[in-house]
Image (cartoon, grey):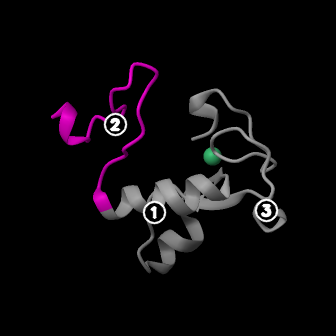
C-alpha cells in the first residue's frame, strides 16, 4: 500500500512517509491478502503481503469492515472501484 503511493517503506516510516518515532511500530506486518476470518486453511496457506503497521492496523482492517478503501489518488478521488463514489 505504501508502494502504491510511491513510498518504499521498510517499516522505518509512517504511512504518510514521516520517520516512525514509535520503536514498537518499526516493523512490517505479514498480512493475509484475502481475509482468513478464522479459516485455518486460509490462515496457513493464504497469500501474504507485507504492510507497514499503519496500513495494516488502520487502513486494511477498516477496508475489511467497510468493504472498500477510502484512500484517494493525487486527484483527490477515491481509488477503489468499490468505493460508493465510483459505483
Ligand atoms: Zn504502508
Label 2, on which residue? 80
Considering depth in this image, is 59 or 43 the residue closer to the camera?
Answer: 59
- Callout 1: few (<14), some (14-19), or many (20+) C-alpha neighbours within 10 Å? some
Q: Position of residue 39 (x, y in %)?
A: 43, 78
Can the viewer see residue 48? no
CA–CA distance between discs 2 and 1? 15 Å
Tell me: residue 72, above or below residue 15.
above
Q: Residue 82, can we see it?
A: yes
Residue matched to label 1: 61
Question: What secondary structure do most residues of the magenta stretch adopt?
Answer: loop
Instruction: Give the residue at mark 3.
Output: 22
Q: Which mark is first along the chain, 1 or 3?
A: 3
Q: Quadrant of residue 16?
A: top right
**Crowding near the residue tagged with mark 3, few <14, some 14–19, many ≥20 C-alpha atoms within 10 Å:** few
Q: What's the magenta region?
A: 66-87
Q: Quadrant of residue 21?
A: bottom right
Asked if residue 44 lies in the magenta stretch, the reply is no
Label 2 CB, ligand 1: below 8 Å? no
Report the quarter where the C terminus lies.
top left
Mark pair 3, 2: CA separation: 29 Å
| Residue at image point 31% right, 49% down | 68
Residue pictured at 70% horizontal, 38% vertical: 17
Amino acid at each position: 500500500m505504501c508502494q502504491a503511493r510511491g513510498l518504499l517503506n521498510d517499516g522505518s516510516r509512517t504511512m504518510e512517509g514521516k520517520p516512525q518515532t514509535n520503536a514498537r511500530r518499526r516493523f512490517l506486518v505479514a498480512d493475509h491478502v484475502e481475509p482468513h476470518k478464522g479459516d485455518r486453511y486460509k490462515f496457513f496457506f493464504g497469500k501474504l503481503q507485507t504492510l507497514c503497521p499503519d496500513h495494516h492496523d488502520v487502513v486494511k482492517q477498516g477496508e475489511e469492515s467497510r468493504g472498500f478503501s477510502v484512500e484517494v489518488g493525487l486527484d483527490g478521488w477515491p481509488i477503489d472501484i468499490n468505493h460508493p463514489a465510483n459505483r
